[in-house]
Structures are given as C-alpha cells and as structure tokens.
Amino acid sequence: MIALVTGANRGLGRETARQLAAAGHTVLVGARSETAAAETAAVLGEQAVAIRLDVTSTADIDDAAAEIERRFGHLDVLVNNAAIHYDTWQRVDTADLAVVREAAETNVLGPWQLTKTLLPLLRRGSHQRIVNVSSQAGALASIGGGTPAYSLTKAALNALTLMFAAELRPEGILVNAVCPGWVATDMGGPGGRPVRDGAAGIVWAATLPDDGPTGGFFRDGRPVPW
C-alpha cells in the first residue's frame, strides 16, 4: 500500500506516518520543507519516502503527483493532515480575517486541490482511502466561540469530506473525517492525550476494509456528531 501523509514531519502527521510504516506500508512523508521531509523519512526507515509538499502550492502539488506517478504509478491512501492556525487568541467578533484566509488556504483549499489532483492515481490503487484530519472544534453540533479560523475551516473540511464521499462512493473510494481529540502536539499544546492515541484513529480510517464506512466523522473508530 502506498500512502501519502501531509504535514508528516511532526506531531500527528509524523506519528501517523510512523504507524503506517510500522505496519509495512510505503509512506510518502509530505512536508513543506524538503529537509524536514528527508530527516523525518530517515528516522522512520526504509518504508518512508520524503516528498516536498506545500499544500497551498499548485506547483508543489503537481510535482508531487508527477513524482508519485513516476515512482509508484498509483496511490492507495491520502491522509490530509496538514493544518495551521489553532487561533486561541481570537474571537469571531474581532478576528483578523487575514488569518482566517490563510487558514483556509492550508486547511480547506489545500486538501481540496491535492485530492482533486491525486484522484487519477488513487483510482489506480487497490485500497483507496481518503482521510481528512478534522476536529470536533468544527462540528456544527457543538461549535461555540473562540478559535474562529480553525473552527470555521475544520467545519468546511467536514463538508468537503461529505461531498467527496458522496461523489466517490460508486467507485469504492472511502472518504472519512477523523477527529484525533486534543493531542499533546506543537499545535495542541501540553496536557492532551498521547500523540500515538490520536494517530491510531487516523490509521484506522486509512486501513478500513472495503466494506467499511464512508462519509463519516469518527474519533477512535467511533462516530461523532457533525
């Protein structure tokens, strides 16, 4: 299985890549910095392959697709993990909309463009799974004040998940959103659950059987409200 994980040089992305590699999958370690991708891949071992990928860059996305095509000819799993701006310092009534726009580029439009571009390669795969790493901060069932850039863009990512799932269901491509919970990462800060536990739910969605769910929102393999 060939799996691409974005934002894989640290935190949840790195641990997701590690768990997939440990299970025997070839993992493409996507990171904005070529050096960071290479250093992470070297630590993860021979199952890991570095790939420079800024999801806000159309050129990077096109180059990544071409490299995957050249080296592997297909893709089985796409984990859209890269995200920015957990803006705990903002309120919706005073938010800096430049921060919101920047978050949207990475958290929504990046995964959208990357998924579109990689679909031809995914269609050649034998275990097609798309996992969007989301958050209950973007769940309409529980959304409140605070973190407006992060919450709004994760809500949009959830909507994107539902749309892709509906359109790709006839092809057997499973598309799900995963909330890893509050995890002790650079973004989440100290006090959260171990990163391995948050990543385990992402790996679960990436390795679902062919009769697994699609168009769902999950935490630890269990549905959570949209």
Image: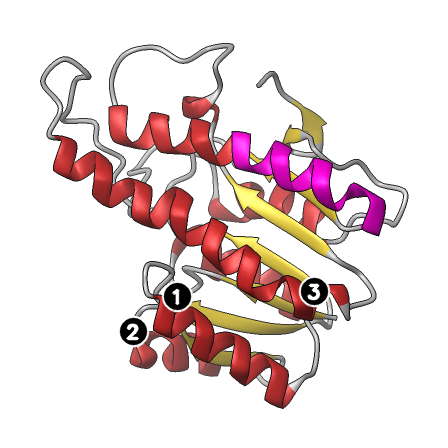
The answer to whether 37 appears left or right of 200 in the picture is left
> Which residue, given by chain and number where applicable, does mark 1 sit on?
9
Mark in front: 1 vs 2: 2
For residue 113, side relative to residue 2 (left or right): left
Residue closest to the eye, 220 or 2: 2
- For badge 2, the amino acid type reads Ser
* Highlighted magenta segment, given as a residue range: 159-172
Q: Residue 33 carries which label?
A: 2
Q: Foreground mark, 3 or 2?
A: 3
Q: Is mark 1 in CB contact (under 8 Å) with mark 2? A: yes
The answer to which of marks 1 and 2 sits earlier in the sequence is 1
Which disc number belongs to residue 32? none
| Residue pictured at 59% horizontal, 65% vertical | 118
Mark 2 nearby-residue class (10 Å; few <14, some 14–19, many ≥20): some
**In the rendered structure, does residue 163 fall within the stretch colored magenta?**
yes
- Image point (29%, 48%), residue name: 186
Q: Can you see residue 68?
A: yes
Give the side of residue 80 with respect to residue 70, left or right. left
Pointer 3 residue: 122
Residue 210, percent from left and from top: 88, 49
Question: Can the viewer see residue 81?
Answer: no
Residue 89 sits inside the magenta stretch: no
Numbered-mark total: 3
Q: How is the image coloured?
A: secondary structure
Q: Could you say whether the residue bearing mark 3 is in a helix, strand or loop?
A: helix
* CA gap, disc 1 and disc 2: 9 Å
Give the image location of residue 74, x and y in percent.
70, 75
Residue most toward the right?
211
- Whole-percent x and y of residue 19? 62, 61
Crowding at mark 1 (Cα within 10 Å: few <14, some 14-19, many 20+): many
- Quadrant assignment, res 16: bottom right
